[in-house]
Amino acid sequence: MNQTTAAGPISIDDLRRELTGEVIGPDDAEYDEARVVIYREDARPAVIIRAETDADVVRAVDLARDAGLELAVRSGGHSGVGFGTSDGGVVLDLSAMKGLDIDVPGRTVWAETGLTAGELSTALGAHGLVIGFGDTGSVGIGGITVGGGVGFLARKFGLTIDNVLAADVVTADGKLVRTDSQHEPDLFWAIRGGGGNFGVVTRFQYRLHELPSIVGGMLLLPATPQVIAGFMAAAQAAPDELSAIANVMQVPPMPFVPADKHGTPGLMALMTWAGDAESGQRALAPFRALATPIADMLRPMTYPEMFPPEQPGPHIVGINRTFFIDHVDEEMGRLILDRIDEHVRITDALAGVAQLRVLGGAVARVPADATAYAHRSGRIMVNVAAVVPSLEAMAAHTDWLDDFAAALDQGDDGKYVNFVSDEGEAGVRQAYPGATWDRLTELKRRYDPTNLFRLNQNIPPS
């Protein structure tokens, strides 16, 4: 079976003979399902290589480079811009690479990048060990790690990249490189926050932390300007053991929420106390005292329970803007509520959300130039978003998002690359300010001079 592209024929049959992993072509029954990612359904790649070994990854990189084809690299497929697939190119799907080697006494793990955050957290949890990723279990560890990794344990244990000890990377010239602080240290610096611009990471070695139990879950409060400001002040003043993600939105019709609360303003907080139950309950008391909770699901649990199984059904379609601020007061809380209410009432948006992630703690104790994630002084990460009925509806909400973000601006124009939307080079430059951008472009020239790895928030080699 051959697949003809602008660069010439690809022999699907030859690839199947060469590779250990699955090779999926346009004529295969599973092609339509395999080509789709969360935010893109229209792309028709020439071939999808579901790698199982490093050699498979090397062959996919060589194929795309030598044939002059676009290369899409997919770990979990959660790119908000749909970078995990390609129209006419090669899709390198890492989801079958789930190798895992846990050193329990040494508190380290080698993990292949087809694993999801939920899968790895569950495997580590069996030994009372953790590493923080994001807040969604189905996200692939490859993509979230190379972008930084801001999640439930960030204030206590830092970003995911702050716990990376080494990595195996297939570079644009088809070489498999082991990189750490002593070997290829520039590459090691770049893959910790620089996204997928420098190669395909096939496995990471992570430092682990002992944490047999947490107090965590969701706290849903009625949202008023006073509650929003009080919650954020309490979260910023809390010990590093407490990480909180506050979602200000209209309360969705969840089964555990009384019907008369559906559609009312709510603050849905995902909270994690990385410590014992007694001290956790004391730390959470000020948040519960802000207002009578609509739902209080905070309880002692193991860390993997923060990643419940995702429910089947269509994925949420959203469009967003991300940035950093220093504080949230009552005036800002009122502005957030008014903007969300107005937008949902007068547009086809299914929801409007202002997500507020409190940072600081261990994140801020790492020097800004130690990794390619340069926003160590950011105190609160904001992600404003509109949930819309279809991909086609997204463009109609960009003006609202831009105006909303401008209204909340406090002078920090930085962005977290994993939350950057389709904002062009300007958005990418905001993720990598000043000297960070200069160093990344120089390393891009060294490791990927032809920009083979460009389906990402791209750092060009010039």
Image: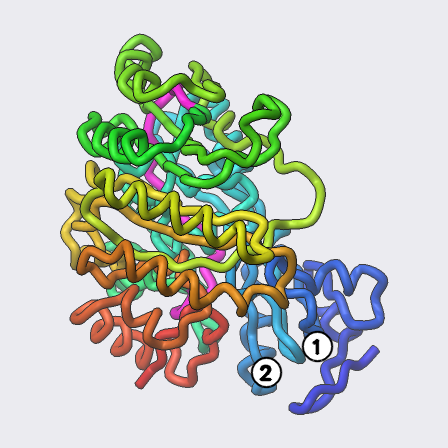
Q: Earlier in the sequence, mark 2 or mark 1?
A: 1
For the magenta stretch, what is the residue range?
196-216
Structure colour scheme? rainbow
Give the quadrant of residue 271: top left
Picture coordinates of residue 187, whole percent (x, y):
30, 65
Q: Residue at x 46, y 18 (%)?
A: 296
Q: Nearer the viewer, residue 175 or 1?
A: 1
Mark 1 closeness class: few <14, some 14–19, many ≥20 residues within 10 Å: many
The circle drawn on residue 240 is none
Mark 2 closeness class: few <14, some 14–19, many ≥20 residues within 10 Å: many
Check contact, mark 2 vs mark 1: CB within 8 A: yes
Residue 2 within the magenta-colored segment of the rendering = no
Tell me if residue 83 can be seen: no
Picture coordinates of residue 143, whole percent (x, y):
46, 55
Residue 207 within the magenta-colored segment of the rendering = yes
Q: Residue at x 21, y 68 (%)?
A: 433
Picture coordinates of residue 203, whole percent (x, y):
46, 52
Give the quadrant of residue 288: top left
- From the viewer's perspective, tell me whether residue 262 is left or right of residue 172: right
Q: Which residue is mark 2?
A: 69
Q: Which SS does the magenta portion mostly show?
A: strand
Q: Nearer the viewer, residue 344 or 456?
A: 344
Label 2 sits on a secondary structure element that is loop
Q: Is residue 53 above or below residue 110?
A: below
Q: Amino acid under label 2? A: Leu
Q: Which residue is mark 1?
A: 46
- From the viewer's perspective, tell me whether residue 293 is left or right of residue 314: left
Q: Amino acid under label 1? A: Ala
For the N terminus, the quadrant is bottom right
